[in-house]
Image (cartoon, rainbow, N blue to C red):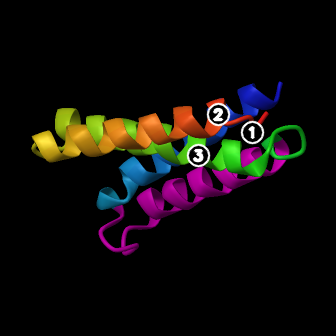
């Protein structure tokens, strides 16, 4: 069940981060409310995850998958360039998470 909460935390964080641009520097009310609500849900779900899973593993997976998703969303929906450097960087982040998990963190 902890992994379900981790997926909820990742999804909420990705949604909130995706909304950041639409808040226009937190000057637009409803996008700002939705963005902040996403971050609240994300952190609440993370708090539940760390009851049963090591915090290092939870944070590594949350940040890596969130980063990869945001890079993809930026490229597909926000017109941001998908450069070789971004692909290599995200690949290294994911490799780091795999290494943390294989390193006996469970």
Look at the numbered discs 2 and 1 and tell me whether their residues touch, using CB distance below 8 Å: yes
**Is 22 drawn above or below residue 102 in the view shown?**
below
The single residue placed furthest to the right in the displayed view is: 51
Q: Which residues are magenta?
A: 23-48
Left or right: residue 30 versus residue 57 is left
The single residue placed furthest to the front in the displayed view is: 103
Point out which mark residue 101 bears: 2
Residue at the disc numbered 1: 105
Q: Which quadrant is home to the N terminus?
A: top right
- Give residue 18's position: percent from left, percent from top: 37, 48
Helix or strand or loop: what does disc 1 sit on? Answer: loop
Camera-side residue: 62 or 37?
62
Q: Which quadrant is home to the C terminus?
A: top right
Q: Is residue 79 visible?
A: no
* Residue that appears at 64% across and 41% down: 9
Point out which mark residue 60 bears: 3
Helix or strand or loop: what does disc 2 sit on? Answer: helix
Q: Residues within 10 Å of mark 1 (few under 14, many from 20)?
A: few
């Amino acid at each position: 069940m902890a992994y379900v909460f981790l997926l909820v935390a990742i999804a909420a964080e990705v949604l909130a981060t995706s909304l950041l641009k639409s808040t226009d520097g937190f000057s637009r009310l409803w996008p700002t409310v939705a963005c902040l609500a996403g971050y609240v849900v994300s952190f609440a779900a993370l708090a539940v995850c760390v009851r049963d899973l090591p915090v290092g593993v939870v944070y590594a997976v949350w940040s890596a998958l969130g980063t990869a998703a945001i890079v993809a969303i930026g490229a597909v929906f926000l017109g941001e360039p998908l450069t070789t450097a971004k692909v290599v960087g995200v690949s290294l982040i994911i490799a780091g998470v795999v290494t943390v998990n294989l390193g006996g963190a469970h």
